[in-house]
Amino acid sequence: MGGRPRKIKKISKGTFVTVLVINSGSSSLKYQLVNPENGAAIASGLVERIGEEIAFIKHAYGEQEVKLETPVADHSVALAKVLELFDQVGPALSEAGIVAVGHRVVQGGSYFSGPAIITDEVRDLIEGFAPLAPLHNPAHLKGIDVARELMDVPHVAVFDTAFFQSLPAEAATYALDKEVAAKYSIRRYGAHGTSHQYVSGKVTEFLGDSELKQIVLHLGNGASASAVKNGHAVDTSMGLTPLEGLVMGTRTGDIDPAAVFHLSRVGGMSTDEIDTLFNKQSGLKGLTGDNDMRAIRDRATAGDAEARAALDVVVHRLIKYVGAYTAVLGGLDTLTFTAGIGENDPDLRAEVCERLAFMGIKLDLEKNAVRSKEPRVISTENSAIKVLVVPTNEELAIAQQAMSLI
């Protein structure tokens, strides 16, 4: 992988501490230097198009932002360039009080119910779960291997699936032949768990009530719903993989599994072709040709019937899940919107809440229209269910979980 392990200066008593959070994709590397105590993002950046002819690099620190276009052969070169930018632009990691590197990992199987210090054994377990997340875990491992080589501090894996290890068997179990399910580790694992745990915890903190029946809607290009009771997840929309559940930017969400057989037998499509169709060419993109919710909203407002129909499908699926999870929870205290679309699309929130008015939900339209980075209630005082917008912060959650181990 090249390069000597990077010796980070040990911090002295009283000095602030930081965690470098890394999210490694197959051809990208996103990072953020986080103060886990106050939540401040001290520096952040990304490297995109790794392995292509020209890569794009961005590094932001304070008011400084550097953008580069240069060849980046692999993740080792990418991280080496990131470390150079920290030295050149700031802050120098040797002076930044860094005490750990936190790595986002999508799939932790049934083994990890919380964060884990990355040892060789843990690294091999992450690799072993790759068949359950073939688009994610191998990419995470690239970042983990390179970072462990170049940075001589504790490395911590934080798993998207960990929060959902508490799912009751009735929610986690598919009605599949039990021997086949056990042999191939088929169950509901969920995803976006770091976000759902962080946001549901923020709701508890914000309202000062630890005994809540919550539904959290994480709505971005990837989208998922969770049912959380007294701080514990009891159901979630994503399943064996992040494909199941809500309509997403490029993913189908729920679909009859027999569609796979039909496309194979009648359409002559291969498994890989169907996988690509369901994960990368469907959802909003498949319905409209566009996976940007802002563009689809603009088209619908301008009278585009195709865009309006797609939004109706999205809302319909959300309503189904809210209704189902309210039944699973035996009632509902809070409904929370988060992530890129959930936090920034007041029209979608209004459409969902209007369809849920029969449950006693009353939305305050003025509060709903306000843009803020702070948690807030957007329902009226006499609403039977509190509706909130709570910005997610997965990087801070990863940093805090990393700190919990060191």
Image (cartoon, rainbow, N blue to C red):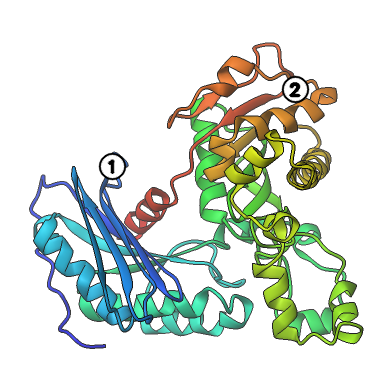
Q: Quadrant of residue 335?
A: top right
Distance, label 1 to label 2, CA atoms, is 34 Å
Quadrant of image for the C terminus = bottom left
| Quadrant, the N terminus | bottom left
**Residue at (48, 38) in percent of width and height:** 391
Q: Is residue 61 above or below residue 105?
A: above
Residue 351 screen position, x and y as percent: 73, 31
First of labels 1, 2 by sequence position: 1
Residue 208 in sight in this render: no
Q: Residue at x 82, y 25 (%)?
A: 359
Is residue 272 in view? yes
Residue at mark 2: 361
Q: Secondary structure at mark 2?
A: loop
Residue 250, above or below 184? above
Across and down, in percent, residue 77 comes to 25, 80
Residue where numbered disc 1 is placed: 40
Amino acid type at image mark 1: Ala
